[in-house]
Amino acid sequence: MSSAAELAWLIPVFPLLGAVVTGMGLISFNRTINRLRKPVAITLLTCLGVSTILSYAVLAEQLAGSPPVEHLFVWASAGDFTLPMGYLVDPLGAVMLSLVTTIALLVMIYSHGYMAHDKGYVRFFTYLALFSSSMLGLIVSPNLLEIYVFWELVGMCSYLLVGFWYDRDGAAHAAQKAFVVNRVGDFGLLLGILGLFWATESFDFQGISDGLANAIASGAVPAWAALTLCFLIFMGPMAKSAQFPLHVWLPDAMEGPTPISALIHAATMVAAGVFLVARLDPLFSQLPMVGLVIAVVGTITCFLGASIALTQMDLKKGLAYSTVSQLGYMMLAMGCGAPLAGMFHLVTHAFFKAMLFLGSGSVIHAMEDVVGHEPILAQDMRLMGGLRKKMPITAITFLIGCIAISGIPPLAGFWSKDEILGQAFNTFPYLWLVGFLTAGMTAFYMFRLYFLTFEGAFRGENKELQAELLEAAGRLVEDDQSHHVGVVHESPWSMTLPLAVLAVPSVFIGLLGAPWNSKFAALLNPEEALEMIETFNWSDFLPLAGASVAISSTGITLAVFAYFLNRIDLGKVIAARFPLINAFLINKWYLDDINEKIFVRGSRKLAREVLEVDAKVVDGVVNLTGLLTLGSGEGLKYFETGRAQFYALIVFGGVIALVALFGALGTSPPA
């Protein structure tokens, strides 16, 4: 009987088959397939459910101590060159397979309720299945080239899902932005892959690592070239995992439906970059400068995301910048030489961030009954408040997510974030300080989100505020805005059940990474886990953990006084006193404006100039050639008379002309 690892190749295949069958049905029998909503949903849920069961079976085998399994076949060959493809199952892959299938399955169940009235219901489910299959294929890929194939498929699916409501200008522009920014990173990744193959003649992870080490030692590859190749490889994760300065696409990706926001932010696209850096840790760890760059980029991203989240009023964008910040923590861990800590935070973050996004979707779904389907109104926290009593399940799970991400023990976020800060303190103390301050900012803005949304009085029926928000966004105030008389209510079971399920790991899964007996580390790297147990010291752990809890508690306390008890008016205390800083944060560090001015307008100006060159120079040369041909043809037709005497006259005239020419040049004509 085959082991689960032997069947791991089926994990990405099942959702792919479901997506292909449904997609072909949409192309061939669009109206009929769109009517079969429940059968399509059940089919795709079943496909993904089978993949989930297989993933947990693979994880169980790895937990039981089974060795990694790798199966390869020759995909292409030419002479001595062979290009293998196949699949790889190891502890890291098993953890990621279980994580992605779990989150994707819950998101798909949630989508049944959230997208129930959307005309693109079937298309959305098809995209979800294809997205999940692409990420699962990326996880089991045994080499960089195969990863790159699925890497691009993940990017394509994100483009389709972010721009799902393509008839909205915001969604169309966000999809284009995500596509273009990721192409920048992917181009660097492709150059890095090709360069590493040139240096090592391998696409295999271990082969690349060993090959580059030998090439550097022998002098075949200079150190600067090795650094360049590693930085090019890192450009891919910088874009996919939204690291500064290629993070700008992720907040705009909130224009897509909320379920896909949860999937992107928790377990698929942004997780792909962190996963690839973890896979390539043996390569990056050879060059300390690469680790330093990754850590610095992660720290900047961490602080940037948190600082911008402080001023956001859009519920989903506040969570989006929170994701940017948490991804920065993960990259900080990778740069500190602690991939286990980074991956552990990826796992814990996936559960509570998926829950937070799905909770925001539940809120938006309820708000649309009051303010209409205008995203500007349905997602603005200034029109929320008092939703805890009307949506208790959503409120409780959202609060759990806020506590978890704030790093309050014993919830999941405390253990993973504290491990990262501990590693940073021992490796780069200055970067630890930035991460430490960011932890306090995280606690503040997350509880700010919670209090503005779920506590206080409900503000959604304030028509003047609605009109003001629409005008500020440049939207026309429609007369029918006053006709929305719906009542905020709890979401259906298909939306609340995933929230309840995700709340459980958000509370308890962090205990698997307790530093004195980390089950997570024992699975991924038993030797490092044993070293952690031997070197663990309460006198080192308690001061850092206590400081982390203290800074988070300070942030929560400030949020309580400002947004729950209303004892502090931060608008007067901070915004009025420091208007430049407030404007800097509200305008997102002006990075979008800089990109718009330099890259968007600059590329358009360059395109116009190229068009001018094409029209006046290239087209001019082509048109001139045509005119010369026509003119010469028009003139030569008069020499085609059909008279032999005329042709003899022309030949005689040509001979006379040649004699005269050579005589003038002082040479004799050739014999």
Image (cartoon, rainbow, N blue to C red):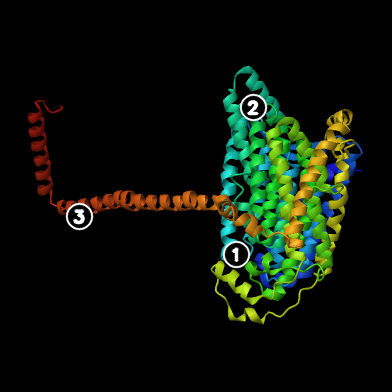
Relative horizontal placement of residue 346, taking residue 594 as reference (left or right): right
Q: Residue at x 85, y 49 (%)?
A: 411
**Distance from Cα at disc 3 to Cα at disc 2:** 63 Å
Please give left or right for residue 641 compared with residue 446 in the image.
left
Q: Position of residue 382 (x, y in %)?
A: 67, 66
Please provide percent x and percent y for residue 401.
80, 55
Q: Quadrant of the C terminus?
A: top left
Asked if one can make out residue 359 in the rendered structure from this viewpoint, the answer is yes
Q: Amino acid at mark 1?
A: Tyr
Look at discs 2 and 1 and give the one toward the viewer: 1
Label placed on residue 6: none
Precedes in sequence: disc 1 or disc 3: 1
The residue indicated by pointer 3 is: 634
Viewer-nearest residue: 589 or 289:
589
Q: Nearer the viewer, mark 1 or mark 3?
A: 1
Query: Distance from label 1 to label 3 (Cα)?
Result: 54 Å
| Res 272 visible | no
Residue 516 percent coordinates (x, y):
89, 35
Q: Residue at x 64, y 31 (%)?
A: 290
x 59%, y 81%: residue: 479
Disc 2: which residue? 200
Amino acid type at image mark 2: Thr
- Would you name the residue on which mark 1 appears? 166
Specify the quadrant that holds the N terminus: top right
